[in-house]
Image: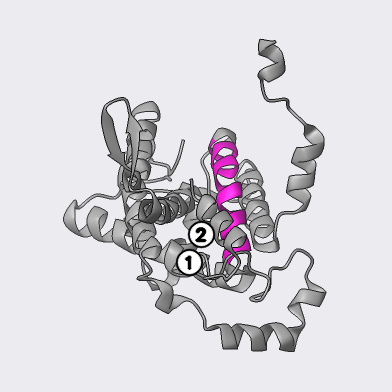
Amino acid sequence: MVSAALPQFNPARIRSYLLRLPIFTRVALFAIIALWFLSILPLWDVQQWGALIPNEIHLSTMHRLNTYPLVHLNFFHVLFNALALTPLLERFEAEHGTLVTLAMFLGPLSTFPAGLYLLIERVILRGNNAVEGASVWVFVLLAAEAIKTYKTNPHFSIGPYKIPTWSTPLILTLVINFLVPSSSFLGHICAIAVGYLFGFGYLKVFAPPEKALRWIEGKLDLLGRLPHYVSVDQKTYGRYGVLPSSTPTLAGAADGQVPMTYQGSTQRLGP
């Protein structure tokens, strides 16, 4: 009886889920895996090229502000980050569309955590601890989801204690820092701060307008040419959360949806 109640591993369902992933999520995962594979070959020092190293940031290396989430230290670093990132990124792309996801993750959701980290690590702490790993995106998305949840369910209970739902990413990063001391606590905190800003809507201004997106999609016929592309009119809920609906069942369902590393000490983002 006990074994029958346990969840069963179903390869067919996992395969079906992977085949339904939207295009940006697929490309991001492919880039992460490809760069890890290249890093184990003796041809190119991928970490040195792409990690966020404070003292290596200048005009000719600004690409690091975008590449550090794609670079990982080893197989397990890739594995855990990919497992954590995939459902969060897939949901984000389904809610906001592929072009918005592309613009945000190649823009403020990568560069703002990096800029904040550089400000604290290099200017305030005078350190040179490098960071890398897709957990920066994981914590940005977790923080945004925590704010969304907080608006409808401000607390959850553990025994007699009421814990604010917005604090869950902070608790998680404390646990990860305890279990994996080589992870970058500061990098995760910077990602959470940017995720909070996004969750409260302060980063909306950096997303391209829908009119421009529709023009680009129509001009390039992206929906017809790119498999698994999510257009601006295909989004599940709307660009920045659940859109108002006159259908009670849809509104109720929407509410229920929300229930590194070289030079200095080598740190990584994530387990």
Magenta-span inclusion, residue 2: no
Residue 67 is tagged as: 2
**Residue 191 % position (x, y):** 37, 54
Magenta stretch: dominant SS? helix
Q: Residues within 10 Å of mark 1 (few under 14, many from 20)?
A: some
Q: Quadrant of residue 218?
A: bottom right
Q: What residue is shown at x 62% (from left), y 55% (from top)?
A: 90
Q: Nearer the viewer, residue 205 or 127?
A: 205
Q: Is residue 195 left or right of residue 70?
A: left
Above or below, 161 against 230 in this view is above
The amino acid marked with disc number 2 is Thr
Q: Which residues are magenta?
A: 77-95
Residue type at mark 1? His
Whether residue 56 is visible here, answered yes or no, is: no
* Residue furthest left as drawn: 124
Expressed as whole percent of the image width and height from the top left, the position of residue 27 reads 67, 59
The x and y percentages for residue 187 are 35, 49
Pointer 1: what residue?
63
Packing grade of label 2 (10 A; few <14, some 14-19, many >=20) is many
